């Protein structure tokens, strides 16, 4: 039984031909990717989490080293969170790693190490939304469940000429209904992966390769010449900017001071050189405040390039201040003093990797 949808599938749209053309194309051209070696739901789960907001070519080496280190749910479940974050270092969006780690623990304790094969149980696991749920169920378990992400919405908005704004959350639900109505019941795995692959390789955002498209004859946008106008997507709000002083403290033993970020919020539990908002100080006032606060005298260097890092919702601008101390005993900060070669043992976010790059520490 298929779901009803607020978007009418055109009467002349041939579902069966669309399915077959897409699946045949996918079977012939599908990329040789490490998570496609088998239908292990754990491997598929890890790959889908890594692939969120990250390009395939970037993910491949991370996936391979992650699976080598944590080949089953059992190894990942018993791993220390800091080690998991270190394995994730450079991929960004670290809440994905924390949620995956917690969810895998739940799989081991509540499901005897078996990834659930139904929507109700999968939905309970931390970090698994409707897309990841659909991907696991269809790819690993051959269930006819939609897996709708930006690529899929772009493809289907063009094929069926859907002009709903894909930036609105309810539109994704509508596309899930649409995909459910047109997807293959016999081979949902190839169908969903075919849609993903089509969006990644052919039906691209700005310059779709329509002449190479296996479902061109089914595409209303191609027929009407409107493919570059779809999908409709309202512009996101302009990102706000936040400026920080990043203090690189160095003691007489050539050790650097690092601290761990809070357990909640952006970049939770990762490590950094201390950061201080510039909203209250200019550089000179900040240095004076720090010296008074900790009863120290800093030997300061600040002739470094500003480090800039773009998140999805905010832009950070970091001004680097390297300060040498004669002693660190009176510094009232919670963290660790580490030598340069010890820095690599700690998980640092990308923005702090850039800091170390500017300082020549990595």
Image (cartoon, helix red, strand yellow):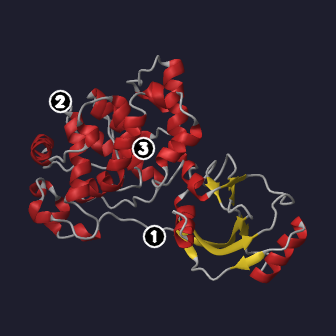
Q: Of residues 86 and 211, which is closer to you in this image?
A: 86
* Coordinates of residue 49 in the picture (x, y in percent): 42, 43
At 35% from the left and 34% from the top, the residue drawn is 43
Between the residue at mark 3 and the residue at mark 2, the CA separation in whole angstroms equals 26 Å
Between the residue at mark 1 and the residue at mark 3, the CA separation in whole angstroms equals 25 Å
Helix, strand or loop for disc 2? loop
Determine if residue 237 is in view: no
Q: Within 10 Å of the Cα at label 3, are there few (<14), some (14-19), or many (20+) other Cα atoms? A: some
Query: Is the residue 339 above or below the residue 36 in the image?
Result: below
Q: Of residues 32 and 284, which is closer to you in this image?
A: 284
Earlier in the chain: of badge 1 and badge 3, it is 3
* Coordinates of residue 273 in the picture (x, y in percent): 66, 62
Res 71 quadrant in image? top left
Q: Which residue is mark 3?
A: 49
Q: Are the residues tagged 1 and 2 within 8 Å (C-beta)? A: no
At 83% from the left and 60% from the top, the residue drawn is 331
Helix, strand or loop for disc 1? loop
* Nearest-to-viewer mark from 1 and 3: 3
Q: Which residue is mark 1?
A: 235
* Nearest-to-viewer mark from 3 and 2: 3
* Coordinates of residue 317 in the picture (x, y in percent): 60, 74
Which circle marks residue 186 in the picture?
2
Which circle marks residue 28 in the picture?
none
Q: Is residue 317 left or right of residue 19?
A: right
Determine if residue 66 is in view: yes
Q: Within 10 Å of the Cα at label 1, are there few (<14), some (14-19), or many (20+) other Cα atoms? A: few
Query: Is the residue 207 above or below the residue 91 in the image?
Result: below
* Coordinates of residue 66 in the picture (x, y in percent): 41, 40
At 47% from the left and 55% from the top, the residue drawn is 90
Query: Is the residue 138 above or below the residue 309 in the image?
Result: above
**Residue sticking out furthest to the top:** 112
Q: Is residue 190 left or right of residue 290?
A: left
């Amino acid at each position: 039984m298929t779901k009803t949808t607020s978007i009418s599938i055109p009467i002349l749209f041939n579902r069966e031909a669309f399915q077959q053309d897409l699946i045949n194309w996918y079977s012939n051209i599908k990329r040789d990717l490490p998570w496609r070696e088998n239908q292990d739901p754990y491997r598929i789960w890890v790959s889908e989490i890594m692939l969120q907001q990250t390009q395939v070519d970037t993910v491949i080496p991370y996936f391979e080293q992650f699976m080598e280190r944590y080949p089953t749910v059992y190894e990942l479940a018993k791993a220390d969170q800091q080690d998991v974050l270190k394995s994730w270092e450079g991929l960004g969006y670290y809440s994905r790693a924390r949620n995956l780690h917690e969810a895998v623990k739940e799989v081991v304790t509540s499901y005897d190490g078996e990834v659930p094969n139904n929507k109700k149980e999968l939905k309970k696991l931390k970090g698994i939304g409707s897309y990841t749920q659909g991907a696991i169920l269809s790819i690993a378990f051959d269930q006819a469940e939609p897996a709708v992400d930006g690529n899929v919405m772009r493809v289907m908005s063009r094929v069926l000429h859907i002009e709903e704004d894909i930036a609105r959350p309810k539109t994704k639900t509508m596309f899930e209904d649409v995909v459910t109505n047109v997807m293959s019941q016999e081979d949902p795995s190839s169908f969903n992966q075919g849609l993903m692959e089509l969006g990644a390789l052919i039906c691209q955002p700005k310059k779709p390769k329509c002449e190479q498209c296996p479902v061109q004859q089914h595409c209303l946008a191609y027929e009407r010449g409107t493919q570059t106008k779809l999908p409709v997507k309202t512009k996101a709000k302009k990102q706000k900017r936040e400026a920080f002083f990043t203090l690189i403290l160095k003691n007489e033993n050539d050790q650097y001071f690092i601290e761990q970020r809070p357990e909640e919020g952006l970049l939770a539990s990762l490590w950094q050189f201390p950061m201080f908002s510039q909203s209250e100080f200019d550089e000179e006032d900040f240095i004076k405040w720090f010296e008074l606060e900790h009863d120290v005298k800093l030997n300061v260097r600040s002739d470094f390039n500003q480090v800039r890092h773009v998140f999805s919702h905010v832009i950070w601008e970091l001004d680097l201040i390297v300060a040498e101390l004669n002693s660190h005993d009176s510094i009232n900060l919670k963290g660790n003093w580490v030598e340069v070669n010890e820095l690599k043992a700690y998980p640092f976010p990308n923005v702090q990797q850039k800091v170390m790059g500017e300082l020549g520490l990595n």
